[in-house]
Image (spheres, rainbow, N blue to C red):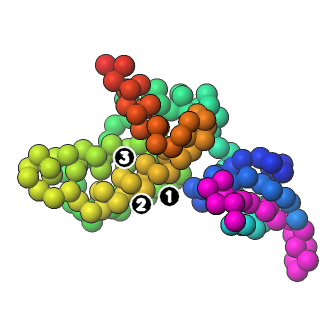
Amino acid sequence: MFKIGKVVLYNNSICTIKDIKKSSINHKDYYVLVPVTDESLIINIPVENNSIKNIMTKEEAKELIKKIPLIKPLETDINDRNIEFQYRNLLLTHDKENLIKIIKTSYLRNEKRINNNKKISTKDDTYLKKTEELLYRELSYSLNMPFDDVFEYIKNYCLSMQ
């Protein structure tokens, strides 16, 4: 059971546990969650719900960033329907390395299209933006840095490794 004041991930949102209350209807305990990006929103979720996760620590964030150059993208020559299926399945795992796979794959696919004088793929662009938001939001919180600085931080780290 998480404690009041703990910052957690719930449905890919970073939330603070503001309270733990007992429902007057079913007498079960509920977490009262407040997203850090919108403190006007209140989410009540049963304590036994398994979708609440610990947010990564600063050390875990740095270790993940160290792994980025080693994480292989998906095959980039897959058609749009199959790539979307793979992206969706990877997103459902809530695994950070899978988010990196999506980011790398969608970036490479879009770069390839641009180099061939084609428009970028809407599916790839949508998943790229969605996964960057999810991953960078958590990294931003864990590393205690502005969201807008995370991409540059990762890029500079990866370039320094070459």
Relative horizontal placement of residue 105, taking residue 3 as reference (left or right): left
Examine the image and state in which quarter residue 13 appears.
Answer: bottom right
Which sits in the foreground, 51 or 19? 19
For disc 1, the marked residue is 92
Residue 95 in sight from this viewpoint = no
Discs 2, 1 touching: Cβ within 8 Å: yes
Examine the image and state in which quarter residue 38 appears.
Answer: bottom right
For disc 2, the marked residue is 88
Of labels 3 and 2, earlier in sequence is 2
Query: What's the magenta region?
Result: 22-40
Of labels 1 and 3, earlier in sequence is 1
Q: CA distance from mark 1 to mark 3?
A: 15 Å
For badge 3, the amino acid type reads Ile
Mark 3 falls on what kind of element?
A: helix
Q: CA distance from mark 3 to mark 2?
A: 13 Å
Which residue is depicted at the point 87% across and 77% down? 26
Query: Whole-percent x and y of residue 20?
Result: 86, 60
Query: Whole-percent x and y of residue 151?
Result: 41, 38
Q: Residues within 10 Å of mark 3 (few under 14, many from 20)?
A: many
For disc 3, the marked residue is 103
